[in-house]
Amino acid sequence: MTDTRLKLKYVNIYADDDKETHFRDVEIPLKDSDYAPPAPPIAVSPHQTATGTVAIGFPPGWFGDFHPAPKHQWMIITSGTLEIGVSDGEKRTLPAGTIAFLEETGSKGHSTRVIGDETSILIVTEVN
């Protein structure tokens, strides 16, 4: 039986029809799956095909003005803190442990700033 309380929560950066970018908070329910037998079933998200994974490092003080994501991509911040701004004017501070999905390719994009004195390291997985 699936435990409907188990969800992957992430920040989504997307573009509307006018190519303005926005944030929204998303939850994906995880469903029990016989994912790695003979281990017991575990809660799993829907499958998504990846095209590549990279690690990215941003030094303290780094700033990137508005730019769209080059591809749809999952981003997991493993260390440091980023401030992300979208074209509608909203900014969010994303600490280590934050998961985000960027899908605003071909839009006005987002800005990125490293907050604090710690290098920010991200794991980025590009998807179809």
Image (tube, grey):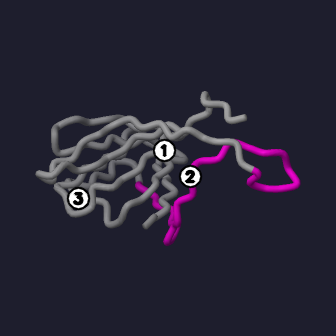
Q: Nearer the viewer, mark 1 or mark 3?
A: 1
Q: Amino acid at mark 1?
A: Ile
Furthest-top residue in this view: 5
Q: Amino acid at mark 3?
A: His
* Viewer-nearest residue: 119 or 23: 23
**Label 1, label 3: how far apart the Cα atoms are:** 19 Å
Quadrant showing the N terminus: top right
Q: Whole-percent x and y of residue 36?
A: 79, 56
Instruction: Check the image and report above or below for 76 versus 3.
Output: below
| Relative side of 108 to 71, left or right | left
**SS type, badge 1:** strand
| Relative side of 32 to 56, left or right | right
Task: Quickly name the residue at label 3.
Answer: 67
Q: Amino acid at mark 2?
A: Pro
* Viewer-nearest residue: 67 or 15: 15
Q: Residue at x 17, y 55 (%)?
A: 108
Q: Residue at x 61, y 28 (%)?
A: 5
Q: Earlier in the sequence, mark 1 or mark 2?
A: 2
Q: Earlier in the sequence, mark 3 or mark 2?
A: 2
**Label 3, label 2: how far apart the Cα atoms are:** 29 Å
Task: Quickly name the residue at label 2.
Answer: 46
Task: Quickly name the residue at label 1.
Answer: 99
Q: Which residues are magenta?
A: 34-58
Instruction: Check the image and report above or below for 122 versus 92.
Output: below
**SS type, badge 2:** loop
| Relative side of 91 to 44, left or right | left
